[in-house]
Image (tube, rainbow, N blue to C red):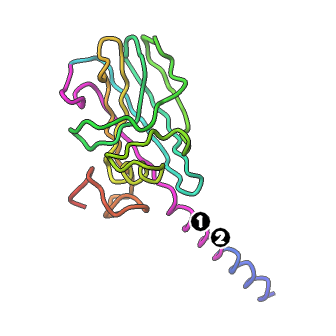
Amino acid sequence: MSRIWLSMLAAVWMAAGMSGTASNHIVTIFGSGSGAFETPAIATAGVATATCTMNSTTVQIACTARVHNIVNLTSGHLHVGGPGASGPVVLAITGLPTGSSDDFVHSWTWTESDVRLREAQGVLKMADVFESCASGNCYLNFHTVANPAGEIRINMCPQGVAEDRFANGLYQINVCAPGR
């Protein structure tokens, strides 16, 4: 009887260890935004939220955005750049309802082959995008006919437990909460 108990305890311990290791390979980033976050800020009724899960094991980023009050959507991108700074496009959002003048929810996944290399900014592979986003140095931008440079900017920041100093398991930087 005790042998079975020990076997079960060992199985639970191994599973806990494996799941702990796996979670170190996943970082969730989140943001909400509007035209007020554009550089320079613009007046618009458009607002949005987004959540992305970065998985360094599968080398993928899976996102969902909820966009409201947008008129004549033309495109959307992930840019590398911290809050208040403009940066280059590194990933294009595919499958957007371009021409849309309404609210929408859109989900997509990026892989290594989707990355636009930006040598000047040090973006040479998906791992470089992970590093930027996990440290709070990326943003989603939705573009429209009226605002081709960007109508809604969502600064993406890593989510974590309040006691978690860095809010992510991949990198030990967080410009979204520099005091932690």
SS at circle 1: helix
SS at circle 2: helix
Q: Quadrant of the N terminus?
A: bottom right
* Residue 162 image position (x, y, % from top left): 33, 58
In the image, 160 versus 140, the foreground residue is 140
> Against 13, is 39 above or below?
above
* Residue 50 image position (x, y, % from top left): 42, 35
Q: Quadrant of the C terminus?
A: bottom left
Which residue is disc 2 drawn over? 15
Q: Amino acid at mark 2?
A: Ala
Within 10 Å of disc 2 (Cα), the crowding (few <14, some 14-19, many 20+) is: few
Which residue is disc 1 drawn over? 19
Q: Is residue 23 magenta?
A: yes
The reply to whether dot 2 and dot 1 touch (C-beta < 8 Å) is yes
Question: Residue visible at 41% across and 24% down?
Answer: 67
* Picture quadrant where residue 65 is located: top left
Q: Check the image and name the residue furthest to the front.
A: 119
Question: Residue visible at 35% across and 50% down?
Answer: 122
* Residue 101 horizontal side relative to residue 111, left or right: left
Within 10 Å of disc 1 (Cα), the crowding (few <14, some 14-19, many 20+) is: few
Q: Which residues are magenta?
A: 13-42
* Residue 47 image position (x, y, % from top left): 33, 24
